[in-house]
């Protein structure tokens, strides 16, 4: 919303300036006073044009937003001998000059480790991120370490128009972890912090 | 107030009925940084696996001496106690532990130990589970950690060897079923 408001404001200013036609107004008379006033108008119009040209078309707010996140439920994993994963497309909006952002993930294991827990037992998982939607793999995330130089295609902060999603989050449970884990029901929380770039 | 209480109670009931979804994903807000979170859940069922079994061959046995063959095998269990039970069945009548050559048969015995490299263990009865066993295996194939975790011992007594016909090959199959505990 803020980005849209800025864009609308910038557009309105440009239209206002463009609509003015100070230099072509009909001349009511050729008196010296009128000639002075006309000259002043030209000077003001020129100054306004210079100021307006210096304004950026869209003043980036350097704000970001992540939405469209869904809980991940692997359910009962029958085959412990193979990797399993779940991916989701999310909305990542970045109102920066380059639409750039970074993302940092932390789990609920010790030190923010990507671990699920079942009592005192733990089950490690992996997190991958892609800056495009509909992906089943991406760049590996490490706990507490930002993945930088990402770029968003979202044009609205909740992806209500334009692309409905703009990034992919993929959670992996590897066979090595599955086969060495104690039977049980595991759960945990993954937190994503997105920053503007 | 009443309506509000009803809505609150409805929410409580739904939450109680869906313990796995008590935590719902949170969405980020617009800002210099934006934070969202999701819950992740997975259930790992009880599983066991037996591996590293090898065939047993008794050849040129002296009938006056008991024959015994012991092998170390891998049994892995992922239960909280790493517990398991084992049930053995033979290929004889009613799953009896017997070897045969046509109509000729000879009985054998089966023992199991919950640790590797043992030459004796608990006697197994065909079709009856030996319970209360615990595995030390940390990998389902014993590819890492202990290389083996249990012992299977097959024996033919001297008395039974003496009933066998010379220069005759007796064969049979022993099947082991391991289950988590």
Image (spheres, coloured by chain):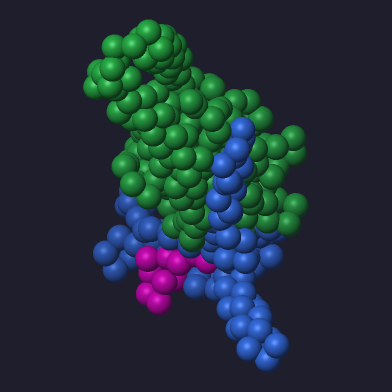
- Tell me which chain appears blue: B
Q: Is residue A171 visible?
A: no
* Magenta span includes A72: no
* Magenta span includes B87: yes
Numbered-mark total? 0
- Tell me which chain appears green: A
Q: Is residue B80 visible?
A: yes
Answer with left or right where residue A7 lies relative to residue A116.
Answer: left
Nearer to us in this view, A120 or A146: A146
**In the image, farthest residue toward the front:** A31
Counting from the top left corner in percent of width and height, residue B110 is at: 55, 60
Q: Residue at x 61, y 42 (%)?
A: B35
Q: Is residue A153 above or below residue B85?
A: above
Q: Which residues are magenta?
A: B85-97
Image quarter hosting the C terminus of chain A: top right
Counting from the top left corner in percent of width and height, residue B38 is at: 57, 51
Residue A145 image-quadrant placement = top right
Q: Residue at x 37, y 58 (%)?
A: B172
Residue A113 image-quadrant placement = top right
Answer with left or right where residue A128 lies relative to residue A193.
Answer: left
**In the image, farthest residue toward the bottom:** B2
Residue B4 image-quadrant placement = bottom right
Counting from the top left corner in percent of width and height, residue A101 is at: 51, 27
Q: Residue at x 50, y 71 (%)?
A: B126
Counting from the top left corner in percent of width and height, residue A182 is at: 63, 53
């Amino acid at each position: 919303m803020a980005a849209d408001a800025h864009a609308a404001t910038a557009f309105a200013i440009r239209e206002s300036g463009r609509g003015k036609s100070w230099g072509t107004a009909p001349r009511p008379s050729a008196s010296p006073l009128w000639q002075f006033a006309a000259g002043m108008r030209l000077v003001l119009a020129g100054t306004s044009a210079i100021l307006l040209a210096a304004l950026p078309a869209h003043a980036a707010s350097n704000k970001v937003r992540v939405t469209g996140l869904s809980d991940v439920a692997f359910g009962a994993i029958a085959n412990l001998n193979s990797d399993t994963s779940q991916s989701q497309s999310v909305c990542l909006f970045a109102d920066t000059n380059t639409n750039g952002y970074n993302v940092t993930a932390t789990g609920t294991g010790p030190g923010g480790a990507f671990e699920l827990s079942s009592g005192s037992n733990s089950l490690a998982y992996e997190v991958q991120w892609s800056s495009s939607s509909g992906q089943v793999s991406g760049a590996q995330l490490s706990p507490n370490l930002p993945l930088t130089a990402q770029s968003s295609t979202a044009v609205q902060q909740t992806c209500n128009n334009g692309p409905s999603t703009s990034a992919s989050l993929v959670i992996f449970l590897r066979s090595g972890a599955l086969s060495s884990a104690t039977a049980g029901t595991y759960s945990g929380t993954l937190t994503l912090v997105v920053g503007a770039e | 107030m009443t309506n509000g209480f009803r809505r609150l109670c409805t929410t409580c009931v739904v939450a109680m009925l869906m313990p796995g979804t008590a935590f719902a994903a949170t969405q980020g807000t617009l800002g210099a940084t934006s934070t969202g979170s999701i819950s992740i859940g997975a259930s790992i069922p009880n599983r066991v696996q037996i591996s590293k079994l090898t065939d047993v061959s008794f050849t040129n046995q002296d009938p006056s001496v008991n024959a015994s063959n012991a092998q170390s095998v891998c049994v892995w269990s992922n239960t909280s106690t790493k517990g398991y039970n084992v049930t053995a069945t033979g290929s004889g009548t009613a799953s009896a532990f017997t070897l045969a050559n046509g109509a000729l048969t000879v009985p054998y015995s089966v023992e199991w130990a919950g640790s590797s490299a043992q030459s004796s263990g608990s006697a197994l009865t065909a079709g009856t589970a030996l319970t209360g066993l615990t595995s030390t295996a940390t990998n389902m194939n014993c590819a890492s950690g202990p290389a083996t975790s249990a012992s299977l011992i097959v024996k033919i007594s001297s008395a039974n060897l003496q009933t066998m016909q010379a220069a005759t090959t007796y064969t049979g199959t022993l099947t082991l079923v391991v289950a988590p505990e």
